[in-house]
């Protein structure tokens, strides 16, 4: 039997004006287990807390009920109070007689009766409380960033700045991501390489940052503070420690017909390559799909020209095991494939291109050295049509139902840059809505219209017809003028929707991080915890969480780093003791709980039990208290009643129900 | 004691999730929004913590109505808890007729931490509905009575 | 039942899904023949402004090529709206419906089964 003390608070007149607090204290005195019941003007005050502490010591109390304001207000205060008196802080319950009684009722009799019932319910619950201790787990002071685009780079730099070790895993031979492929960036029109490459170099030179390029995460075990990650280092057939990045091999390789993915297949590269001049790390990689030496064993030119002796045709995939305290997901985005949109003739004409392809065509390091020429006949285009929302805001199953957010701005940028460089070129932009929220964004779009004379036409393009003379007829409706246009163009640029990288879905499964229907990672709270995944220790940076432009990505990346630093700064993690636990003797191994757990906190293992003198092996569930957040979904899913939740156990809630219904 | 002046006062148990609905109830209090005293709130971490057994137990012990409040769909603190609650309660509620209990004696409502007004009006409305239905006699276990 | 409701039921189209992009009219091969264009059909039905559409030649200029249905990013199906309005205009008032109960009295043993099915499909809308 517990020895319970009841403390009724007046809260000045907040409670005492409508609840007869003396009558409440008197009535609760005769409840089973109650050894002391008293009231005081302000329980949360210094004197009130002393009163509770003294009562605990004098009466050797084992449980405390405070009838006062909402537990959301002062539960933490009173937990500290009882802990100071030597009791377990979780032996306290609060009956909310202010927000739920005195403030909402006027009739004193009615309010007093309700306060007594709530007090009884709290007493009934305290009877079943058990001392709880928060578990502690150590934190590995090292972070993993998955994805080396601008989001991953910024997060890694910020974490390293705070003095913690960071590893970046990048699946491509170089870090930099999509931003390396961009020509200029809105709204200031500075060149992407000029602002990105210094950051890439910072990453390489920072002794806290380690870059695993051409690598992928293959397995994740463990939990917040203690992740155990296996990184697959794909064979690049070049010794990273020996290669100096001189590039001689990439000039001598006889296999010249490999589509260059950096330029989106608009030109070719060799089978051994460095993606671009400013690559970090600047190390050559052999493309095994095209290398004649690897395919037939006849060639070996690169090995002969390499003065450093870095070429190693026998290299194999290797695996690295590393422990991390936090994992940042920064897997980024890709433009969607446009093969389902026949009406825009993307696969029929070389002169229908995507916006990202246009970035490469306009870039000084691109296939045309920065001169805008039609891909088909390398002639200068005189009339260009931009089509917006290709695959965005589509509810027809072919595209994406969301707005891709960045297209309005980059289209305005492209239109402006073309008009500036080639004033003889007419530019048309077909739009549904122009969406330019952001600092200096709408001004930027207006500048394209007002200063650069870009023709914005409200209306979607219905069809792009490739003509025999090599031009493209763009058929669109001009909604504001009520006409149908048939515009003869030389180049058509499609603002393709963006989607999360394909690697995100299997990664989410590995991390037990949740995703939405579009495969964007879900944040812990859409408004208040936007850079954390609901899974503890997993953080989100950049476009893997939703479409984002560069300024937004960078601010989210830094926010994400702040959260990671907050976690890594701790030596140990104190868990919430109100977590689920499984009674292994009752568990029947059905996996129901595992399926409903949103955090992946439940795992199954075979354990030996002595049953009737025999050793029996059974499959039972166990909860990892460091991962469990205490929602209780598993307790209801469990058919055998093996799962229960500390602090809100089945018997405790039942006791409250009974006490309330009894009155 | 319930039939003072021939006026029926129902017993209502309200399960409120800690993050949205309990905070909504607190807000109703802070804003001094009145709702009937028949409602007694039990705090649970999440609406998915509410075992259908608790509801049946409440009816068995003489409750006249049980209401479960959780965060709005998509806003659950634990991401998916309220979806589980919705499925479980849909199933339980559909079987109540079979047990001889009017479906109207139970309700599942989404109340956010900002909806003090909604909490108060929902409770008033629910108490009104249950009062009209009268005493729950079907499932009440008389052996549980003192 | 007002005209708008009739059109919506007959066509099965949800006009509220339209986001006014104009792609239907951008794709329409009969655009220049029509007084009202596919996107106007959607927006006028949304407003309940059906009579001008019923009187317009446009309903007969639609080729029912379904280009607008194929291209619509929101799945609105303007051609089905035009078809419904055409039916409204073509059918004489009062006898434009057939109920299952009326069929037995109309049955002719010589009538091919296909004809009954077709008539029912057409008149039950």
Image (cartoon, rainbow, N blue to C red):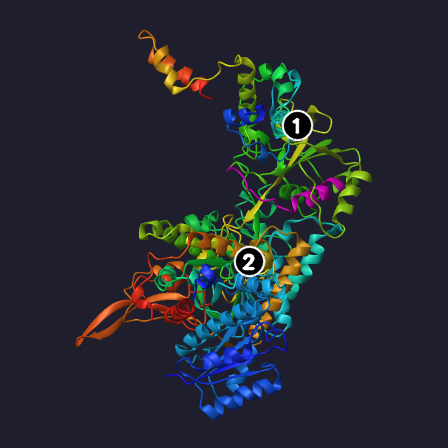
Q: Residue furthest left?
A: A613
Query: Which sits in the foreground, C70 or B47?
Result: B47
Q: Chain of mark 1?
A: A
Q: Which residue is mark 2?
A: B119
Q: Residues within 10 Å of mark 2 (few under 14, many from 20)?
A: many
Residue A470: x and y in percent read: 64, 26
Q: Is residue A145 visible?
A: yes
Report if residue A283 lies within the magenta region: no
Dividing the picture into quadrants, the one containing residue A11 is bottom right
Q: Is residue A237 visible?
A: no
Residue A590: x and y in percent read: 30, 61
Q: Is residue C99 left or right of residue A415?
A: left
Q: Which residue is mark 1?
A: A476
Magenta highlight range: A397-416
| Residue A473, above or below A581 | above
Q: Residue furthest bottom?
A: A58
Q: Chain of mark 2?
A: B
Rendered residue at 72%/42% (across/down): A412
Residue B80: x and y in percent read: 47, 57
Query: Which sits in the foreground, A325 or A361?
Result: A325
Q: State the SS at label 1.
A: strand
């Amino acid at each position: 039997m517990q020895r319970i003390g009841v403390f009724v608070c007046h809260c000045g007149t907040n409670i005492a004006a409508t609840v007869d607090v003396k009558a409440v204290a008197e009535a609760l005195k005769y409840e089973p287990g109650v050894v002391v019941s008293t009231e005081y003007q302000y329980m949360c005050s210094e004197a009130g807390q002393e009163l509770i502490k003294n009562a605990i010591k004098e009466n050797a109390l084992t449980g405390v009920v405070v009838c006062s304001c909402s537990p959301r207000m002062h539960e933490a205060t009173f937990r500290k109070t009882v802990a100071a008196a030597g009791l377990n802080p979780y032996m306290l319950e609060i009956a909310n007689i202010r927000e739920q009684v005195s403030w909402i009722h006027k009739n004193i009799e009615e309010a007093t009766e309700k306060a007594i019932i709530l007090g009884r319910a709290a007493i009934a619950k305290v009877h079943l409380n058990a001392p709880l201790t928060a578990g502690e787990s150590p934190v590995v002071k090292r972070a993993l960033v998955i994805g080396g685009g601008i989001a991953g780079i910024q997060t890694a730099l910020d974490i390293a700045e705070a003095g913690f070790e960071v590893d970046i895993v990048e699946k491509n031979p170089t870090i930099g991501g999509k931003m390396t492929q961009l020509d200029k960036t809105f709204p200031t029109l500075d060149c992407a390489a000029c602002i990105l490459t210094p950051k890439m170099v910072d990453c390489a030179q920072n002794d806290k940052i380690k870059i695993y390029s051409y690598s992928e995460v293959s397995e994740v075990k463990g939990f917040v503070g203690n992740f155990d990650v296996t990184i697959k280092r794909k064979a690049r057939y070049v010794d990273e420690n020996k290669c100096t990045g001189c590039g001689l091999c990439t000039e001598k390789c006889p296999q010249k017909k490999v589509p260059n993915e950096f330029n989106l297949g608009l030109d070719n590269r060799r089978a051994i390559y460095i993606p671009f001049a400013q690559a970090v790390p600047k190390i050559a990689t052999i493309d095994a799909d095209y290398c004649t030496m690897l395919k037939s064993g006849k060639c070996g030119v690169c090995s002969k020209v390499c003065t450093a002796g870095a070429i190693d045709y026998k290299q194999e995939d290797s695996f690295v095991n590393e422990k991390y305290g936090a994992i940042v997901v920064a897997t980024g985005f890709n433009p969607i494939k446009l093969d389902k949109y026949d009406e825009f003739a993307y696969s029929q004409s070389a002169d229908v291109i995507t916006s990202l392809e246009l970035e490469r065509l306009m870039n000084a390091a691109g296939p045309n050295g920065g001169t805008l020429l039609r891909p088909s006949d390398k002639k200068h285009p005189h009339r260009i049509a931009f089509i917006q929302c290709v695959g965005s805001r589509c509810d027809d199953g072919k595209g994406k139902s969301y707005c891709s957010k960045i297209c309005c701005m980059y289209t305005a940028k492209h239109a402006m840059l073309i008009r500036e460089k080639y004033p003889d070129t007419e530019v048309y932009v077909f739009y549904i809505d122009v969406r330019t929220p952001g600092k200096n964004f709408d001004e930027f779009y207006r500048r394209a219209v007002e200063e650069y004379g870009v023709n914005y036409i409200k209306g979607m393009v219905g069809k792009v017809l490739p003509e025999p003379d090599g031009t493209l007829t763009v058929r669109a409706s001009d909604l504001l003028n009520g006409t149908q246009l048939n515009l003869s163009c030389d180049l058509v640029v499609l603002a393709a929707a963006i989607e999360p990288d394909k690697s995100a879905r299997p990664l989410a499964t590995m991390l037990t991080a949740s995703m939405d229907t579009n495969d964007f990672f879900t944040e812990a709270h859409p408004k208040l915890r936007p850079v954390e995944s609901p899974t503890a220790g997993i953080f989100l940076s950049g476009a893997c969480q939703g479409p984002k432009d560069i300024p937004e990505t960078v601010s989210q990346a830094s926010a994400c780093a702040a959260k990671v630093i907050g976690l890594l700064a701790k030596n140990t993690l104190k868990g919430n003791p109100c977590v689920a636990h499984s009674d292994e003797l009752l568990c029947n191994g059905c996996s129901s709980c595992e399926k409903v757990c949103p955090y992946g906190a439940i795992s199954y293992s075979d354990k030996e039990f002595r049953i009737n003198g025999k050793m029996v092996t059974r499959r039972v569930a166990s909860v990892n208290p460091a991962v469990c957040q205490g929602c209780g979904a598993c307790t209801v899913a469990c058919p055998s009643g093996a799962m229960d939740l500390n602090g809100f156990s089945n018997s405790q809630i039942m006791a409250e129900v009974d006490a309330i219904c009894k009155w | 004691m319930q039939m003072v002046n021939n006026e029926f006062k129902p017993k209502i148990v309200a399960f409120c999730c800690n993050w949205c609905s309990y905070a909504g109830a607190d807000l109703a209090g802070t804003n001094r929004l009145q709702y009937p005293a028949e409602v007694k709130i039990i705090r649970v971490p999440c609406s998915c913590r509410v075992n259908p057994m608790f509801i049946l137990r409440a009816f068995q012990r003489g409750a006249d109505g049980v209401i479960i409040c959780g965060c709005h769909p998509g806003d659950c603190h634990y991401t998916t808890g309220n979806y589980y609650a919705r499925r479980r309660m849909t199933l339980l509620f559909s079987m109540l007729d079979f047990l001889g209990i009017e479906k109207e004696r139970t309700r599942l409502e989404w109340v956010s931490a900002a909806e003090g007004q909604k909490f108060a009006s929902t409770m008033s409305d629910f108490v009104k509905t249950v009062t009209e239905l009268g005493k729950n006699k079907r499932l009440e276990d008389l052996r549980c009575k003192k | 039942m007002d005209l708008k409701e009739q059109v919506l039921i007959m066509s099965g189209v949800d006009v509220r899904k339209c986001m006014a992009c104009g792609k239907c009219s951008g794709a329409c091969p009969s655009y220049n023949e029509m007084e009202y264009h596919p996107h106007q059909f959607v927006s006028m039905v949304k407003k309940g402004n059906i009579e001008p559409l019923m009187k317009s030649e446009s309903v007969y200029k639609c080729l029912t090529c379904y280009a607008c249905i194929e291209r619509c990013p929101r799945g609105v199906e303007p051609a089905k709206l035009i078809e419904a309005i055409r039916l409204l205009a073509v059918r004489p008032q009062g006898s434009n419906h057939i109920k299952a109960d009326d069929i037995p009295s109309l049955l002719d043993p010589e009538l091919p089964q296909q004809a009954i099915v077709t008539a029912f499909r057409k008149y039950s809308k």
